[in-house]
Structures are given as C-alpha cells and as structure tokens.
Amino acid sequence: MKLVIEISKNDYWLACNHPETLIGVYAQAIKNGTPLPKGHGDLIDRNLALSDDGLCEFHMYYDYVKMRNYLKSIPPIIEADKEGEE
C-alpha cells in the first residue's frame, strides 16, 4: 500500500535524526494519510504541466503529439504502481 502523508519540517527532521521519539506523530500521520489506489499512474505536478512555459506553444497549434510528449517529459513525483496494473 502506498500512502501520502503530511508532516511538518520539524517532525521530518526528528524522524531522520531521532525516529524513536515520534511514534505518536507517525500514527497520526498514517491515520490522516491519503491512500493511493492500486494501479495508479505516475503522479506529476499539475501546476508544472499547466504552466505557461509548457503550454504556450500548444495553444497556437493544438498538436496532440507535442502535448503528449510534453506530458511524458514531466518527471513523476511518485512513480506508477506497476504491481496494480496486472
């Protein structure tokens, strides 16, 4: 299972340097986390994908191939779930 959690920078620092001190913080973060569905695709930054720099040439030409290649070039934040794609 993949889960997206949110913790503060301070908690992250403590987790990296003193992990034994944050059991309660971990439990709360997991409880409030967002599970990713099995078989999800690459998760990308939508703001980057929709930025003016990336899309300006497509507004003029509406070129599907260019758009597809552009979207494929955006590095994923989280890789696709290959196991769930069976």
Image (cartoon, grey):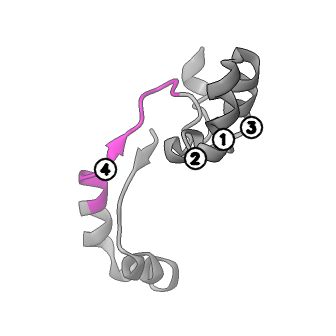
Residue 31, given in percent of the width and then of the height, sits at: 24, 52
The answer to which quarter of the image holds residue 82 is top right
Q: Amino acid at mark 4?
A: Gly
Q: Which residue is mark 4?
A: 33
Earlier in the chain: of badge 2 and badge 1, it is 2
**Which residue does the image show at 57% across and 45% down from the upper left?**
51
Residue 23: x percent and y percent? 31, 72
Location of residue 82 with respect to 30 vertically, above or below? above
Q: Is residue 32 above or below residue 41?
A: below
Disc 3 to disc 1, how far (Cα)?
11 Å
Residue 64 vs 44, above or below: the answer is above
Return the disc, 2 or 3, that comes first in the chain's sequence.
2
User: Which mark is in front, 3 or 4?
Assistant: 3
Tell me where the magenta segment starts and ends, as one range: 29-40
Q: Which residue is mark 1?
A: 54
Residue type (three-letter) at the residue carrying disc 1: Gly
Assign the N terminus to one quadrant of the image.
Answer: top left
Q: Which dot marks residue 73? A: 3
- Horizontal side of residue 83 vs 66, given as left or right: left
Secondary structure at badge 2 equals: helix
User: What is the crowding at mark 3: few (fewer than 14 residues within 10 Å), some, or many (at least 20)?
Assistant: few
* In the image, farthest residue toward the front: 60
Q: SS for tag 4?
A: loop
Q: Earlier in the sequence, mark 3 or mark 4?
A: 4
Q: Is residue 17 or residue 66 the one in the foreground?
A: 66
Q: Are marks 3 and 1 in contact (CB under 8 Å)?
A: no
Left or right: residue 30 compared with residue 51: left
Residue at left offset 64%, top offset 37%: 56
Dots 3, 4 in contact, CB < 8 A: no
